[in-house]
Amino acid sequence: MDYEEMKRRAALEAVREVEDGMLLGLGTGSTAAYAIREIGRLLREGKIRHIRGVPTSRKTEALAREVGIPLTYEFEEIDLTIDGADEVDPDLNLTKGGGGALLREKIVARASRRVIIVVDERKLVPRLGTRFPIPVEVLEFGLGSTVKALRGLGCRPRLRGGFRTDNGNLIVDCEFPEGLSNPGETETSMLSIPGVLEVGIFTDLADEVVAGTRSGIRRLERTS
């Protein structure tokens, strides 16, 4: 089984949790896209009804419209969000933002009653930051000062060249050579820097991770 098939199977497993009438958070990325296409198929076939989606990026919005999912940007609470991740540690902390949608993804996740993360087995890591840099959304104004402050936290910051978020901001990818020993502490420290808008560390947000593996589907639930 290749990694694309692992992602597809994980996404389809998560979509089984969708019920009629739900307001859904629609994640960004290749794995979330499998879930969006499946939700659209179920809607077209009449197997689920009265679903609305909240897209976390323009790319997700375009795909959701293509497959026929009604959309809204008005919400106070979201029933269920299905999204992907770049890394998942044993405590279900996440690295997200490879697609640059971390700010909207975190807003949607925070507003959700339940968050299911879908990944393939490569994304399961012993420590965040070991395989993927931590994306940080920053203002262009004062960029040099912001990058200097990020470097002071022990990371190797690198501006993501030629990229703007849907919010018109920049992404700095922060490499931590030894990974993160305390993701929550690093998230808080980064967010305290003027010019940092959001950090691609998601702590205490994933209720469940559905991972596609060579041996089948693996489900991991947050215990605290």
Image (spheres, grey):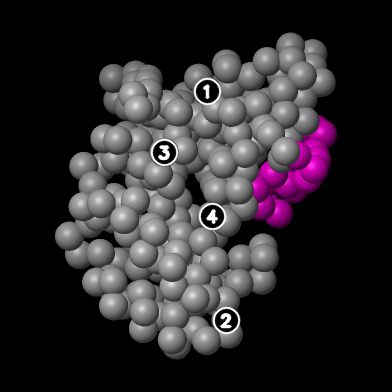
Q: Nearer the viewer, mark 1 or mark 2?
A: 2
Pointer 1 or 3: first along the chain: 1
Pointer 4 or 3: first along the chain: 4
Pointer 4 or 1: first along the chain: 1
- For the point 44% across and 73% down, the residue is 193
**Distance Cα–Cα, label 1 vs label 3:** 19 Å
Q: Which mark is residue 204?
A: 3
**On screen, 100 above or below 140?**
above
Residue type at the position of mark 4: Leu
Q: Please name the residue that numbered disc 1 is placed on.
A: 14
Spot occupied by residue 57 in the image (x, y as percentages of width and height): 66, 52
Circle 2/circle 4 CB separation < 8 Å: no
The residue closer to the viewer here, 82 or 202, is: 202
Spot occupied by residue 101 in the image (x, y as percentages of width and height): 57, 55
Name the side, left or right, on which 10 lies relative to 70: left
Q: Please name the residue that numbered disc 2 is placed on.
A: 140
Q: Please name the residue that numbered disc 4 is placed on.
A: 102
- For the point 58% across and 85% down, the residue is 141
Q: Secondary structure at mark 2?
A: loop
Q: Quadrant of the C terminus?
A: top left
Spot occupied by residue 126 in the image (x, y as percentages of width and height): 21, 42
- Judge whether residue 108 can be spotted in this image: yes
**Distance Cα–Cα, label 2 vs label 4:** 17 Å
Based on the picture, tell me whether residue 190 belongs to the magenta stretch.
Answer: no
Residue range in magenta is 55-75
Pointer 2 or 4: first along the chain: 4
